[in-house]
Image: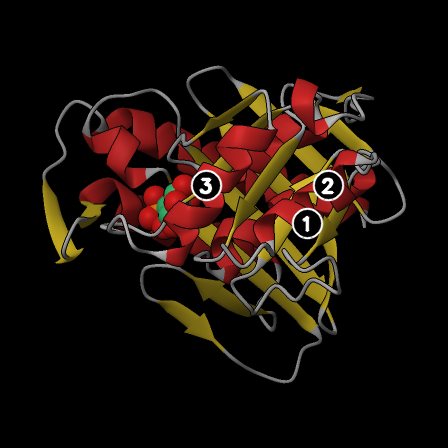
Amino acid sequence: MTEFLAAAQAAARLGGAILQEWSRKFTAREKSPANLVTEADLASEEAIAGYLLERFPDHQMLGEESLNRTGNSPFRWIIDPLDGTSNYVHRFPYYAVSIGLEEAGELIAGAIYDPNRDEMFAAAKGQGATLNGESIRVSDESLLANAMCMASLPVKADRTHVAVRKFLNALEAAQSVQRSGSAALNLCSVACGRIEAFWSNSLKPWDMAAGVLIVREAGGAVTNTSGTLFDVNIPDLLATNGAGLHGELVDVLTRES
Ligand code: IPD
Ligand code: CA
Ligand code: CA
């Protein structure tokens, strides 16, 4: 496990350095409307995949840009080489590299690196979560009325979209609801107690894998927005500090109107 966690962190740091190197010279294009990609996303993914493959040649790998390596190994790395591309393109410094590892479908290690703040969040199953090597824990706020929350909305969601309705309902119930542009960093913010909750119905495995383990290992709760079993392959996530406000949010997010 130590070897896996060390590799995840080293690979995330490697990807982060590449993002910062490209930040002065990248060009952006749309993969689909308002869904951006840059040379930095691709270069970071290539470097991370190369690093991990050299150490674990038989492992499976899934990365956002062009990485889908299948095989018989029970291990699968789930990689977002740049989470927060839109922020990156606008030079808003809230983006990260996210690397999770599954063994037989169970999340066992994860690292998320924020190169702007030089913050490395990491966790291994059963061993707790850390920020730059120091143990972290979720906040102990239990009331939604006192909670700061974040939500991810689909790109280009219009005002009639169900995710927008959920966002507005939560806005009335929580102290504040923000939208930040990096799901991975939102999960880290839940884990270290900077915010109380984060939810989305539009994320991919690479947005969530590492962060979900980091939240759990920091003492938080991760379910789907209905309050039942979370599955990294299904875009339905509610991550909180695990206090009473988790149930309050399930009620708010499943409200019919
Ligand atoms: C995006 C971010 C954002 C979320 C989007 C994701 P990307 O990832 O995590 O917070 O709302 O759904 O696609 O595209 O920047 O890697
Ligand atoms: Ca992402
Ligand atoms: Ca990405």
At horizontal 83% and vertical 22% (from top left) the residue drawn is 140
Which element is circle 1 on?
helix
Kindly identify which residue carries mark 2.
Answer: 248
Report, in whole angstroms, how far the alpha carbon at label 3 lies from the one at label 1. Answer: 13 Å
Report, in whole angstroms, how far the alpha carbon at label 2 lies from the one at label 1. Answer: 5 Å
The image shows residue 58 at horizontal and vertical percentages of 60, 73
Q: From what the image shows, is residue 62 above or below residue 99?
A: below
Q: Residues within 10 Å of mark 1 (few under 14, many from 20)?
A: some
Question: Which amino acid, by three-letter code, is at mark 2?
Answer: Glu
Furthest toward the top, the residue is 117
Kindly identify which residue carries mark 1.
Answer: 251
User: Would residue 165 be found to the left or right of residue 39 on screen?
Assistant: right
User: Would residue 208 be found to the left or right of residue 215 on screen?
Assistant: left
User: Would residue 52 be found to the left or right of residue 33 on screen?
Assistant: right
Q: Residues within 10 Å of mark 2 (few under 14, many from 20)?
A: some
Kindly identify which residue carries mark 3.
Answer: 167
86 or 152: which is nearer to us?
152
Furthest toward the bottom, the residue is 72
Q: Is residue 5 visible?
A: no
Question: Which amino acid, by three-letter code, is at mark 3?
Answer: Phe
The picture quadrant where one finds residue 23 is: top left
257 or 27: which is nearer to us?
257
At horizontal 81% and vertical 40% (from top left) the residue drawn is 217
